[in-house]
Amino acid sequence: NTEGYLDLTSYHALKKLQRELFGYRPLVYICSPYSGDTEANVELARQFCGFAVSAGKIPFAPHLHYPQFMDDADPDQRELAMFFNRVLLAKCEALWAY
């Protein structure tokens, strides 16, 4: 507004309009095992993500995403990935643990 304060009324009105125009699906963090039998665990995580989509959610499974370009065996990269996970978890509306 003109006084420099956050105008929550406008924010909520625009957010509502955006949801009406584009639809809305909540972001959910998919937490499931990765280490051990990684091939089987990756397949399970894919199934959990598919279930989330069928339930009208947007799934985020970091253990399907980060191994594409980060090395879990490298302590520095693992720590960075865990930092990313905490930041992204804060953006999610729910955590689904399997």
Image: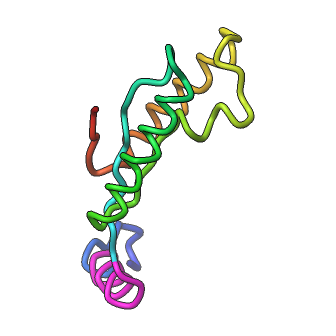
Viewer-side residue, 21 vs 12: 21
Residue in the image at 40% along x and 60% along y: 58
The percent position of residue 44, horizontal first and vertical second, equals 42, 38
Dominant secondary structure, magenta: helix
Would residue 13 be found to the left or right of residue 35 on screen?
Answer: left
Residue nearest the observer in this picture, 81 or 59: 59
Q: Where does the image place residue 50, in percent across and percent down from the top left?
A: 40, 56
| Frontmost residue, 93 versus 8 | 93
Q: Quadrant of residue 29?
A: top left
Residue numbers of the magenta segment: 11-23
Q: Specify whether residue 73 is painted magenta.
A: no
**Horizontal placement of 59 versus 71: left or right?**
left
Which residue is painted at 37% across and 30% down in the image?
32
> For this rendering, which residue is in front, 3 or 95?
95
**x, y percent for residue 19:** 34, 81
Percent x, y for residue 34? 48, 24
The residue sitting at 65% across, 31% down in the picture is: 67
Residue 39 position by quadrant: top right
Q: Residue 79, relative to residue 97: is it above or below?
A: above
Q: From the viewer's perspective, is 31 left or right of 94?
A: right
Up-down: is 95 above or below 34?
Answer: below
Residue 95 falls left or right of residue 87? left
**Residue drawn where x is 34% and y is 50% of the image:** 28
Q: In which quarter of the image is the N terminus?
A: bottom left
Specify how the rendered protein is coloured. rainbow
Where 14 falls versus 63 (above or below)? below
| Quadrant, the C terminus | top left
